[in-house]
Image (cartoon, rainbow, N blue to C red):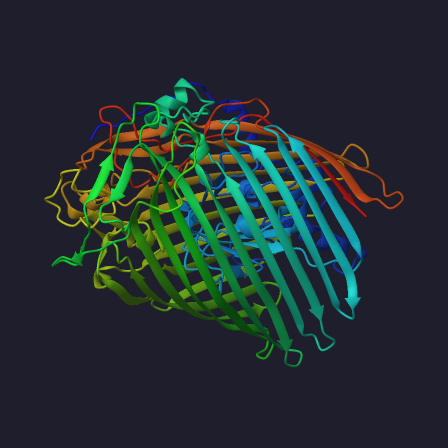
Amino acid sequence: MSRVTLQNRRHTSTTAVALVSALALAVPASLCAQSEPSKRGDSKTDVDRTDIIVTGKRLGAGKSRATFELDKSDIADRPLGTDITLSLDKVPGAKVSTGDARGGSFSFEVFLRGLNKEQIGFTIDGIPTGDARFNGGSPPQRFIESSNVSGILVSQSAGDIGAPSRFALGGSIDFRTDEPSKQTSAIVEAGYGSDDYVREFFRVDTGELAHGLSAYGSFSHQANQNWAGPNARHARRDHFEFKMDKLFDNGAFLKAKLAYNDQFDNDYNIVTLPQFYANPQSDNLSDTLTAIPNKDAFYGGTFGGNRKDFLAYANGGISFGAHALLTVNPYYQSLRGHSLSYQNKDRLLSGGDPAAVLSYNATGGAVRPALITTSNPNVVGGPADMRVTPRNRDRYGVTSELKLTDTLPRSTIRLGGWWEGGLSTEDRNYYPILSSTFGLSWQPNPSYVLYRRSTRIETVMLYGQDSFAIIPNILRIDAGATWFNVHYTAKSPLEYAAQLSFSQHSQILPKIAFSLKPINHIEVFGGYARNFSGISEDAFLGSTALIAPGELKPLTTENFDGGIRFTLPHFALAVQAFDVRLNNNVGIVPNDPKVTDPFDIARGNVATKAVNILGTHTSGIEVSGQINLKLIEFYGSYSYQNAKYADAAPGSIDRARLASVGIIAGTPVRDIPKSSAFAEVTLKPFAGLRLQANGRYDGSRVGGDIISPTFQEIGIEYVPGYVIFGASARYTFAKTGILQNASLQFNVDNVFNNAYIASVTSATATSTETGLPGRSLGRYFLGAPRTLTLSLRAKF
């Protein structure tokens, strides 16, 4: 196997990288001198302890596991209305990107300690959002208005007990929304910026309507042009939220929330590395409709889709005496959406019924009428189809927990469970375009239906934990365990006769952690956890690969982490190490390893099957620190991650299976830089003014393992590292008249307009190269250029 190393045409600044990394470690001697612990009982001690809690909270002070917490001020640093996940950029070990500086769907990618967005658990107020696939999945930002978020809790390890997710193999992220205000108020926000960005946001808090009852409702509209194709592509988002909170005199509570999101976006295309070097400001889609099918197949106006998402949930709690609390949290989520793709030919299923099946053959495959294909793609008005893929989803479930405090001395016991059911469907329909000389209108009825797939997944999780203070305020042990059972049913009657129905369950999964405070200001923590993930919905909805339930083992991980935190008034520092081993990954491979004709092995068709493949191993170190003074604040983090696919001997079946899903055994995991850093400095020169500058560094990383259609290992393609900078200024006006906390904010993302590759798409992660010896497979999302946003916020 040869190794293909591609040099960066633009050298990153080593000075900038060193500066970013050093910020996390910088501790002014004068600050340390001023922060000597006072004598026990002195009134200053209480102040210091409060400062320590506030300063160290971001870095997880008091937690027995690696934890990072973002508060409302962190979220407010981004332009108002920005995709909430982009605030995760500050989290050590995390890498998040979208094609636009304010958000994106197809271009949304996130990694945490070497694991991707489909291996991380996402929740909102503890309610699971499901998997984060952009098509058919439930990315958490669909249900969140960033201006209504009070904080984000990131559990970087997998030891967080009770996280209701089948995907939390290596961590979970909980987005916590605002509670309704007890005072009647109204908030108005407006935004304007690059690429014709506009935003309007309204929120009304009712105040206390009755004893213990309050609520708020909000609506936002925002839209912008696509920076790579402003004449053909745009994004639009209309979002509604309602939340109510009722507190009872006996300590019981009831909270409920509704979120509705209507979104359309023409997102960004993926490019090859040579295309990036040739024109780093273009994603190679056309901005003009020509009526020539071969050209309009790359017309950006058909690159995207529409979806409507709805989420409703309640959080209810009742106390039994002073030491017992029972919470019950039901929820329901729905998706109705579709994506579009222009096709440079026309398809017609003979016989008049586009979904006809004549019979099933001996192996269960569908026998269908002849497919008639008409193609004349290089002439004006040539026949063409619009491929429409509707995706619908309904999820419903409930979480519940009984918390017992001090029923045993110095002990907090948690016993809980989670149940979820749901149905997901995906169709693929082809509609003849009426006349490609008159725009993009198509017939109301499909001429060909390729498939109609559906799957039901039912999940049960049980857990228990005892958090025991062995030495109060010094040593605490958290010991718990979880157990999963997942049942799957799936069918696709236009492709095969079989109807799958089977279950997978986990072993008892231990989760153990400790927190030790040997002396003032020092906290040592560590833990071990095993986690489980069932088969993703995409395995049933995204392919027709054969699934033999008895041959598939569920995905599991083993997670170790530990570290030390040092906190003083106005200063905090955390150093933590981790080790994550993922086993029993699932991939789509050929049925018969002797079949190597690429035309016989179209990925995901009935010539393939789902099997377990080797996993990954990631280890690393994270350093983060912050200094909070009256006029200036510093924050910095550095992450080292060594993420690799498992190795396998040449010629082995394990190595062949990895190659068939686009992986060369033993190589680094794609899109995970070994070194990354983030630094931020905030100045507050006088009351009301907040000035901020930040920088993000990601080192060179693997973009793709280059493998031929016959599964020969060719080499490794590296993408260059980058440094990008951001800046913002916010002025909060004095409280005068009816205005309260009115502010004007200006953000500049990518200040120096650097061209860079932001991420490796998951869409082609398992694909082999098709154009060897050249590179023809698009793999990369471009980073957004300089983006300006002006935001106004007023509270009445």
* Left or right relative to 697: residue 794: right
Q: Which residue extends farthest left?
A: 594
Q: Quadrant of residue 282?
A: top left
Looking at this rendering, what residue extends furthest in the front direction?
Answer: 352
Q: Is residue 503 left or right of residue 23?
A: left
Q: Nearer the viewer, residue 698 or 590?
A: 590
Q: Position of residue 599 (x, y in %)?
A: 17, 38
Q: Nearer the viewer, residue 333 or 19?
A: 333
The quarter of the picture where the N terminus appears is top left
Q: Quadrant of residue 620?
A: top left
Q: Position of residue 618 (x, y in %)?
A: 37, 46
The correct choice, above or below, for 713 with respect to 494 in the image is: above
- Looking at the picture, how far across and down is residue 450, in whole percent? 28, 48
> Who's the residue at 70% across and 74% down the image?
251
Residue at 12% over, 48% down: 592
- Total residue callouts: 0
Measured from the top left, where is residue 220 in percent x and y?
A: 65, 46
Residue drawn at (25%, 59%), measured in percent from left and top?
A: 552
Q: Is 462 placed left or right of 195 in the picture?
A: left
Question: Which residue is most to the right?
Answer: 737
Residue 554 visible from this viewpoint: yes
- Location of residue 738 with respect to 779 vertically, above or below: below
Query: Residue 662: in sight, yes or no?
Result: no
In this rendering, the answer to whether 692 lies above or below 35 is: above
Closer-to-camera residue (770/496): 496
